Image: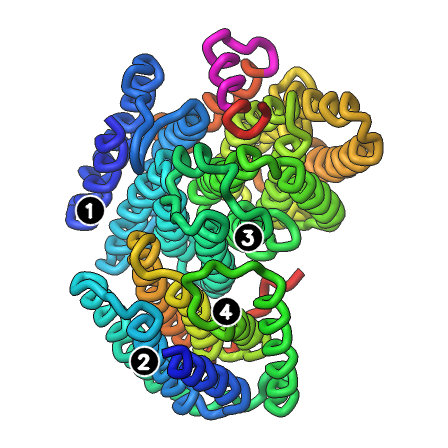
Amino acid sequence: MIWLLLTVPFIAGLAALALENNRVRRGLLLSAAAVHGGLVIEAWRHPISLQVSGWLGLDEASLLFLGITSALFLAAAVSATGTLRMEEASRQAQGHVSAPSNAHERIFTACLLLFLASMTLVVVSRHLGLLWVAVEATTLASAPLIYHHRHKRSLEAAWKYLLICSVGIALALLGNFFLAVSTSVGTGQQIPLNLDDLMAGAAGLDPAWLKAAFLLLLIGYGTKMGLAPMHTWLPDAHSEAPPVVSALLSGALLNCAFLGIMRVQSVLTAAGLGEFGRQQLVLFGLLSMAIAAVFLLTQTDYKRMLAYSSVEHMGVLALGAGLGGVGSLGAALHALNHSMAKAALFLTAGNILTVARTKEMGSVRGLLSTAPVAASMWFAGILAVVGSPPFGLFTSELIILKAAVDGGRWWVAAGYLTALSVAFVAMIWAVVKMVFGEPSLPAAVTPPDRWQAILMYLGPAVLLSGVLLTGLYLPGPLYSLLQSAAGLLGGR
Amino acid sequence: MANMTDTLAILLILTNFRLLGSSRLWSCIQTVAIQAVLLGLLPLLTNPELTLRVGMILAGMTFIKAVVLPWLVRRSAREVQVKREIEPMVGFTVSLLVGVGLLAVGVAASRRMALPSQLSSPLLVAVAVFTILTGLFLIVARKKAITQVLGYLVMENGIYSFGMAYAVQEPFLVEMGILLDVWAAVFVMGIAIHHIHSAYDHIDTDRLSALKE
């Protein structure tokens, strides 16, 4: 089962590299995404296949993040098909169907699929060394995606992404080494870096080395997750990448890095040092939220605004996990909600971009009359992501606030609320100006044909209704999954 | 044995200082290669009873680190015609002084941690930390994309030397990971450098500033 989850996207990725025909390749992308989704549903329905052993395994936390990744990828694959189709049409309209751009599309599709395979590996690995290799693989698979459009700005973004994330990942490797040292200092007997073995032998770990290892891993994976102050690559990469890629980076990849941190945190908790780890998480969480809120106030580019909002929400995740207890449940729910909302927003931003042809917020006005569908989805998505009811993010943010208040941590609660409200005001203010008012664009944009419209709007629409649903009603199985995932994430 | 290990550690320290003080790209690349060879010798001293399998992996790793990677970097340096780092963010004399400070940090760090018994020389941990910090410093303090890649390699060497100093038997996969990591990173970065060059006609990353906040 797990092997299928890994090999399907991997082989499809290799095949996409070899396929010549554009239509067949897009079909392959869609069907691989659908098969992956089907496998995840199958794993969900038959917990018997959840047996955890050795290097790979599916526990509830993996299942939650795997579900998010797979659903997002399916939505992104649909949108990607639309985008690629449109790009090809515009190439043909300009009269040159050149070979290199065809090759670009081939690499793009292949990297998307390999990206899915590597993210799946992150989620299912039970060995911290393997987890590390998988996180590194996500970086390598996604760097060419950011650089897809091949202009200067996307090159700069890809360079920053590669360099900063490679340094982060190198520090995480050092953290793994420290962890290995911590197992043998006390006893002289090395424990393999397997999660189960580590948890079982946690009492024998050397606290000083373990703490150092946690800090290194937190900084390393935190770079990938976009926690401040290691977030500097994120706004560039997320704003310069094609919208489909931004959706995956923001919605799926950041979560994977978060899962990596939480795996280490669970070892720390088992060793009786959970409080130390939680303090760091609260600290980094609040810092990320504060920095993101400040930068949200000054953004003029709407995709960059979404990127900073991702930094803010990663802060919320870290804070929720750091508060522990009911906060962990909030963090698990928040990860689900944020992924759906943010991916929908990035995909919608892509749709706006095709209409408006600019990322400047100042030049987009009165979108409601020029592109009503995109504009209403955009507005709904922003309302969701700033945490207004009835969307799911309101619930999860409220749960995390409750965790802070229950623990009597008033300063944390105050900082949390301040950052959230600054972000709320900044984003709503910017978006109201974009959506309402006098249209700045010529209304006579040729409407896309029906297939194109379906491909463009289907993904974000489904994701947005998902966020709405989790806000109104949490189905029982989903709730119990979230609860056990939160338990695994260190919430006792 | 311990004597030899200490000699190696001191040689590693010297390579770091050469990297910090040299402006010529050529000698920097050469120094990184020398460092890799020294690292390849290290496990022979720390672990006398090497199996054939471990030996083969070590030999392969050293070959890639000492021959293939420097060759790749040198090739891309030739392609973009960079010979020296002319205007670093931090001058070379100051860099050397910073290096002394970093070495002190490394020694201090190695004293504070309880070391496992396998470590034959406490100096090695200090050197590993020093090498990692040197790599980080090079990434921050140099402008050219190629020098930054070199800094990254130095940092990797430092992490690797920590792994070597500690144990070669256990985390095999992790070590394979290092290999993948270094190789693939430089491979991809090499391509990136190439594109930066063709897009901008220079490879100064500080002039990549369209996205400055």
Q: Which residue is tagged 3?
A: A209
Return the x and y of residue A427 as percentages of the image width and height: 71, 37
* Residue found at x 57% / y 9%: A473
Amino acid of disc 3: Trp
Residues at discs 4 and 3 in contact (Cβ within 8 Å): no
- Magenta segment: A471-485
Q: Which residue is tagged 1?
A: A14
* Residue found at x 28% / y 70%: B48
Quadrant of the rendered structure where residue A50 is? top left
Callout 3: helix, strand or loop? helix
Amino acid of disc 2: Val
1 and 3 marks on the same chain: yes
Label 1 or label 3, whichever comes before in sequence order: 1
* Chain of the residue under the numbered disc 1 shown in the image: A
Name the side, left or right, on which A29 lies relative to A139: left
Crowding around mark 4 (Cα neighbors within 10 Å: few <14, some 14 to 19, many 20+) is: many
Query: Between residues A54 and B196, which one lies in front from this camera angle?
Result: A54
Answer yes or no: is residue B168 visible: yes
